[in-house]
Amino acid sequence: PTAEYAICKSYNRWLADIWKSAPDRLKWVVMPPLLSLDKTMEELEFAKANGAVGVFLRGLECERRLDNPYFYPVYKKAEELDLPMCFHSGNNSFNVRDIYASEAGFGRSKLPVVSAFHSLLMNGVPAKFPKLRWGFVEVSAQWVPYALNDLEIRFRRKGKRMSKTIMADNNMFVACQVTDDLAYVVEHAGESQLVVGTDYGHSDTSTEIEALRKIKADGKISAAVADRILDGNARTLY
């Protein structure tokens, strides 16, 4: 916990200093030292006062799933501060990372985020924090129809009906990629729940520097939906 706090605090101060150089240009998300929840509350307060627009999380944190009540105080504080929870490709579980150590990164980095999306909705966590927003970033969006279909089946087995607008109902957003079948994903996720990024400065499978231009120009979706993905939806999330 001591090392984690030192690293997170120094990172957050560094980003806050950069933000002060151009407050209208650069927004950032805060790294919470989750092994020390009292320090996490302090960092969230600092971040909100210094240009942060979200809270960074991975698909697993502190060897726990994100539907664990351990994280409820963080969600409550973030809701009060109007800071969305921003899940990024990756996991903070030594056990899971070791299991997938020799594979390409799909199991250890991407799937934990998909699982977090599923488990949060399955266990009704977003409903406990109705004003909190949730973003799932750098895992594409092609999996959304599959996850929603699986959730609907599981809800039905429990005698429950799943809303067709469950993502909008729970303020959940997913970052798509230009390689996604966007028309198919939008049909299931809804027009208001997708955002996009370029992964600028980081060369990996999610990087597409021309993403903003391609989504607008490739004709896969209507211009109105493209505008929402490129602008309005992100403004709502952040």
Image (cartoon, rainbow, N blue to C red):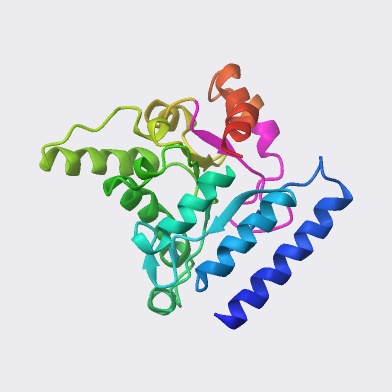
Query: Residue 178 at x, y = what percent?
Result: 57, 38
Q: Tell which of 80 and 117 is nearer to you.
A: 80
Q: Quadrant of the N terminus?
A: bottom right
* Residue pictured at 50% horizontal, 41% vertical: 133
Q: Is residue 151 above or below residue 236?
A: below
* Residue pictured at 74% horizontal, 56% vertical: 201
> As drawn, is 170 to the left or to the right of 47?
left
Residues drawn in magenta = 192-214
Q: Is residue 100 above or below residue 203?
A: below
**Residue 131 drawn in magenta:** no
Query: Residue 162 at x, y = what percent?
Result: 24, 33
> As drawn, is 171 to the left or to the right of 81?
left
Please identify the dominant SS of the magenta region: loop
Which quadrant would residue 56 be assigned to in this image?
Answer: bottom right
Query: Residue 62 at x, y = what percent?
Result: 44, 72
The reply to whether residue 31 is visible in this rendering is no
Residue found at the very far bottom of the displayed protein:
2
